[in-house]
């Protein structure tokens, strides 16, 4: 793990089978049901991806940790949506904050939902943003809507669908940012690891838009290097954000990738990630070339899921 648990979670699950995208327009707000419990007690429920548990944080009155089969997936503070407990989420948030003029609304497509941590963050720091969240686990979405409802007027639309299917059906040049945080169990499904998938993401972005994703790997980084090769085939600019210990191959951990057809704010990203509680490094240019070291893009027919994490890598004690 990149840091003491639960700061590096396994990300939201996405089973292979999912409903087709509905033809009707997406509602402005997801359906919610029931109030947040007055007394914070754990909530356990079976969902499509396993057994979900919402556990209250004793140090923050309305903060909750979501786990599925014991692995952390999301952390949400209903009173402070800008509080991001997990380091990888902060790195994704840095990308979002540095896209467009500060404080201006964004159009964001989120692939993978969990407890909607990053959509809530964007709604708070970029009021007026239009966000669509794609999550394959319908039962998980129902749990989140019931126990961690979105505030009125959030501008967040949520629907159940397969991430690749939703991405390929999205209008061209319709998003400022595409955020991918999609895991089936503890692995990214193969259909989200190909160069065709990367090109589908590029098609959805407006000129100057950014794709960012949470990945996980360890030395010799066969998977991570292939994903960077995919992005380099689909985008003009690519960078990688990860902790030094992960980049040196000392342990399995998360890595955030960023890609665009325009110049990336590498220096600003480097300053922000270096100042985090668990500092990270930004690799780009010649350093990234050396890291990729001739890895080739992966076609759909050859794509494989991300590697299985070592036992206990993304679980809580």
Image: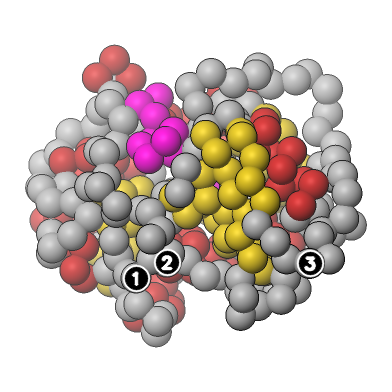
- Residue highlighted by disc 3: 39
- Mark number displayed over residue 7: 2
Residue at the extreme bottom: 275
Q: Which residue is drawn at 13% across and 63% down?
A: 250
Horizontal and vertical percent position of residue 296: 18, 34
SS at mark 1 in the image: loop
Residue 259 sits above or below residue 169 on the image: below
Give the Cα separation between the discs numbered 2 and 1. Answer: 6 Å
Quick check: marks 3 and 1 in contact, CB under 8 Å? no
> How far across and how far down the image is residue 284, in percent?
26, 62
Residue 4: where, in percent of width, then height? 34, 70
Bin the neighbour count of mark 1 within 10 Å (Cα to Cα): few under 14, some 14-19, many 20 and up: few
Q: Residue at x 61, y 33 (%)?
A: 47
The magenta span reads 176-191
Instruction: Give whichever of 236, 112 is nearer the camera.
Output: 112
Give the SS element for disc 3: loop
Which of pointers 2 and 3 lies earlier in the amino acid sequence?
2
Residue in front for this viewpoint, 47 or 239: 47
Look at the numbered discs 2 and 1 and tell me whether their residues touch, using CB distance below 8 Å: yes
Q: Label 2, label 3: how many angstroms apart (C-alpha)?
A: 25 Å
Image side of residue 207 versus residue 315, left or right? right
Question: Does 6 appear above or below 43?
Answer: below
Mark 3 against mark 1, which lies toward the viewer? 3
Q: Quadrant of residue 256?
A: bottom left
Asked if the stretch drawn in magenta spans residue 225, the answer is no
Q: Tag 1 or tag 3, which sits nearer the N-term?
A: 1
- Bin the neighbour count of mark 2 within 10 Å (Cα to Cα): few under 14, some 14-19, many 20 and up: many
In the rendered image, the quadrant that contains the C terminus is bottom left
In this view of the protein, which residue sits in the foreground, 67 or 121?
67
Tell me the crowding category of disc 3: few under 14, some 14 to 19, or many 20 or more residues within 10 angstroms, Cα based.
Answer: few
Label 1, on which residue?
Answer: 4
């Amino acid at each position: 793990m990149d840091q003491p648990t639960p700061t590096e979670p396994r990300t939201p699950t996405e089973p292979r089978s999912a409903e087709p995208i509905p033809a009707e327009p997406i509602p402005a707000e997801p359906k919610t049901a029931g109030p947040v419990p007055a007394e914070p007690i754990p909530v356990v429920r079976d969902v499509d991806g396993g057994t979900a548990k919402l556990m209250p944080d004793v140090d923050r009155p309305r903060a909750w940790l979501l786990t599925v089969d014991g692995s952390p997936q999301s952390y949400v503070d209903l009173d402070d949506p800008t509080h991001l407990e997990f380091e990888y989420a902060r790195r994704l948030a840095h990308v979002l904050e540095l896209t467009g003029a500060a404080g201006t609304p964004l159009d964001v497509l989120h692939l993978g939902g969990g407890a909607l941590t990053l959509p809530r963050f964007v709604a708070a720091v970029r009021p007026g943003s239009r966000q669509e969240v794609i999550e394959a686990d319908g039962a998980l979405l129902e749990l989140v809507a019931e126990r961690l409802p979105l505030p009125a007027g959030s501008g967040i639309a949520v629907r159940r669908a397969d991430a690749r299917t939703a991405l390929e059906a999205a209008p061209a040049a319709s998003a400022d940012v595409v955020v991918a945080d999609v895991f089936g169990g503890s692995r990214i499904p193969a259909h989200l690891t190909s160069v065709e998938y990367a090109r589908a993401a590029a098609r959805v972005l407006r000129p100057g838009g950014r794709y960012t994703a949470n990945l996980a790997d360890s030395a010799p980084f066969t998977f991570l290097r292939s994903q960077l090769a995919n992005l380099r085939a689909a985008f003009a600019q690519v960078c990688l954000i990860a902790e030094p210990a992960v980049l040196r191959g000392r342990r399995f951990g998360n890595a955030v990738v960023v890609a665009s057809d325009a110049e990336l704010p590498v220096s600003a990203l480097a300053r922000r990630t270096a100042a985090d509680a668990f500092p990270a490094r930004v690799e780009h240019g010649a350093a990234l070339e050396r890291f990729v070291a001739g890895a080739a893009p992966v076609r759909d027919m050859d794509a494989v899921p991300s590697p299985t994490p070592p036992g206990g890598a993304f679980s809580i004690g």
